[in-house]
Amino acid sequence: MTSDCAVGQWTFVSRLPIMKKINYLGESTLVPLELKSTINLPRTGFPMKANLPQNEPKIMARWEQMRIYERIREVRKGAPVYVLHDGPPYANGPIHLGTAMNKCLKDFIVKSKSMSGFDSPYVPGWDCHGLPIEIKVDQQLGGKKLQMRPVDVRAECRKYAEKYLDLQRQQFKRIGVFGRRYIKDCALSTGAFTMKPRWRKRRSNTRTIPVRLYG
């Protein structure tokens, strides 16, 4: 079986592979070959495309509805405790590949310890002080900073840190990190961050930083 394809003054003949098709009456006809019919493929209702941008948020919402982190804590209550003391990221911008890899590796450890029978809670934390945040705010303010009072500059730094703390919280949830819930229906809701007065007060009253707030 052939078909002609004319392009300008030239005519090309394309040869199509053919196969014999037999109907229910036993009559045979020649039809173009269906290549997929020559491969032994499984028949399944599983979709060919993962459609992760659409399906992953649905999975996250299902985990939230199931309260899966709280259920893990309830099941592991009374088991030997394993606490991962997490060095928190700076709240100075969206997460990047390094931040994501860091969190994923730590999440692997926490989840694997939970699966091994340990009570392994995780409290997310953020470092909201220091040059990384101040430098970003300086870049935003520019020469305006020279006309501002120090207390107003610090207020801008706090506002900047809170903005990216909230953003990073959602991004960590998006990559599947489990963490302790402090506010109903919001995983990784507050965590521990160095702007909390409680953290500053405890730090001023002790010689060492209470790592429990980060772990």
Image (cartoon, rainbow, N blue to C red):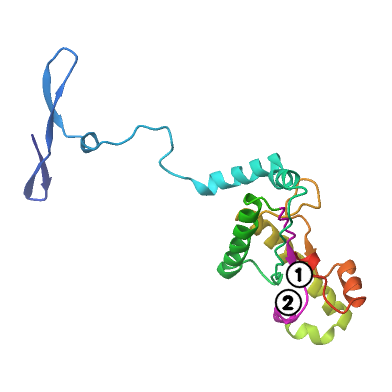
Residue 162 falls inside the magenta stretch = no
**Which residue is depicted at the point 85% across and 83% down?**
148
Residue 130 falls inside the magenta stretch = yes
Q: In the figure, 144 relative to 40: above or below? A: below
Q: Nearer the viewer, residue 77 or 37?
A: 77
**Which residue is depicted at the point 65% across and 43% down?**
63
Q: In the figure, 21 relative to 173: above or below? A: above
Give neighbour class at mark 2: few <14, some 14-19, many 20+ (Cα, 10 Å): many
Count of marks placed on residues: 2
**Element assignment for label 2:** helix
Amino acid at dot 2: Ile
Q: Can you give x and y, in whole percent of width and height, for residue 119 in the image?
A: 72, 53
Q: Pick whichever of labels 2 and 1 is earlier in the sequence.
A: 2
List the residue tagged with mark 2.
133
List the residue tagged with mark 1.
161
- When asked about the image quadrant of residue 19, the answer is top left
Q: In the figure, 142 relative to 128: above or below? A: below
**Element assignment for label 1:** helix
Amino acid at dot 1: Ala
- When asked about the image quadrant of residue 111, the answer is bottom right
- When asked about the image quadrant of residue 31, the answer is top left
Residue 142 vs residue 24: left or right?
A: right
Question: In what quadrant of the picture does the C terminus appear?
Answer: bottom right
Label 2 and label 1: CA atoms lie apart by 7 Å
Q: Nearer the viewer, residue 15 or 52?
A: 52
Write the start and end of the magenta stretch as one range. Answer: 119-139
**Which residue is depicted at the point 60% across and 42% down?**
58
Q: Are marks 2 and 1 in contact (CB under 8 Å)?
A: yes
Identify the residue at the far top of this view. Answer: 25
Question: In what quadrant of the picture does the N terminus appear?
Answer: top left
